[in-house]
């Protein structure tokens, strides 16, 4: 775990809260709602130059910026495979799965003793899902594969609650 030696300034925390609260939702087209420097400047009543400098610092050091594609509009689904491995084969299997064109993420997991990897896979339909599942099950060192899919998002909060930002 990496820890920063210095705490964030009051301005950094205020800007973070605004930035993170505005990325909670998505527009109807699936894009994240992003907030402009001008909006932050107006809300905090600080000069635009100060917002720009602090935002740049935060984005370089503390924020992960990315876009997510709404693949449902194209008829695809995002599936998670939960994979059990044997005999120290976790990393080689992860590397093999990353070579599968439909794989977009593979990570080692802890917490559930029978799950060693979590892989995010893009599929077109159940037949495609079954083919990929069989392909991964057939890899040497894989003992089991189960899949899960989010079918309805009940709610989504920011990536870090404002109360946590306060203590940083």
Image (cartoon, helix red, strand yellow):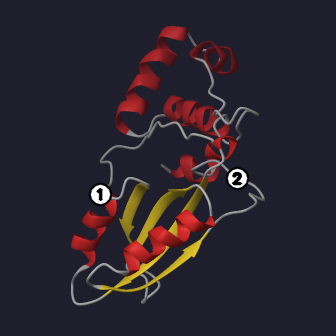
Q: Residue 18 shows which numbered tag?
A: none
Q: Residue at x 35, y 31 (%)?
A: 60
Relative image position of residue 20 (x, y in whole percent): 60, 39
Position of residue 114 in the picture relative to residue 69 (left or right) = left
Front-lying residue, 17 or 139: 139
Relative image position of residue 15 (x, y in whole percent): 56, 30
Relative image position of residue 93 (x, y in whole percent): 27, 73
Q: Would you identify the image quadrant in which residue 77 lies?
A: bottom right
Front-lying residue, 143 or 45: 143
The residue carrying pointer 1 sits among few (fewer than 14), some (14 to 19) or many (20 or more) residues within 10 Å by Cα, namely few
Secondary structure found at label 2: loop
Position of residue 103 in the picture relative to residue 33 (left or right) = left
Relative image position of residue 154 (x, y in whole percent): 78, 59
Q: Residue at x 59, y 33 (%)?
A: 19
Give the residue at mark 1.
99
**Distance Cα–Cα, label 2 vs label 1:** 31 Å
Q: Quadrant of the N terminus?
A: bottom left
Q: Would you identify the image quadrant in which residue 38 lies?
A: top right
Q: Residue 156 shows which numbered tag?
A: 2
The residue carrying pointer 2 sits among few (fewer than 14), some (14 to 19) or many (20 or more) residues within 10 Å by Cα, namely few
Q: In the rendered view, tell whether residue 108 sits above or below residue 26.
A: below
Secondary structure found at label 1: loop
Q: Residue at x 67, y 34 (%)?
A: 22
Front-lying residue, 90 or 19: 90
Q: Would you identify the image quadrant in which residue 16 lies?
A: top right
């Amino acid at each position: 775990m990496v820890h920063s030696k210095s705490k964030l300034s009051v301005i950094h925390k205020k800007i973070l809260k605004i930035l993170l609260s505005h990325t909670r939702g998505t527009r109807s087209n699936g894009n994240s709602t992003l907030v402009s420097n001008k909006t932050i400047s107006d809300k905090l009543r600080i000069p635009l130059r100060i917002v720009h400098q602090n935002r740049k610092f935060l984005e370089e050091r503390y924020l992960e910026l990315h876009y997510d594609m709404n693949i449902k509009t194209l008829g695809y689904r995002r599936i998670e495979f939960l994979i059990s491995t044997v005999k120290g084969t976790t990393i080689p299997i992860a590397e093999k799965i990353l070579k599968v064109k439909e794989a977009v993420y593979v990570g080692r997991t802890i917490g559930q003793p029978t799950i060693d990897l979590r892989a995010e896979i893009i599929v077109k339909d159940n037949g495609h899902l079954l083919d990929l599942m069989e392909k991964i099950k057939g890899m040497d060192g894989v003992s089991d594969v189960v899949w899960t899919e989010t079918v309805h998002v009940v709610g989504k909060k920011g990536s870090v609650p404002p109360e946590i930002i306060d203590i940083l």
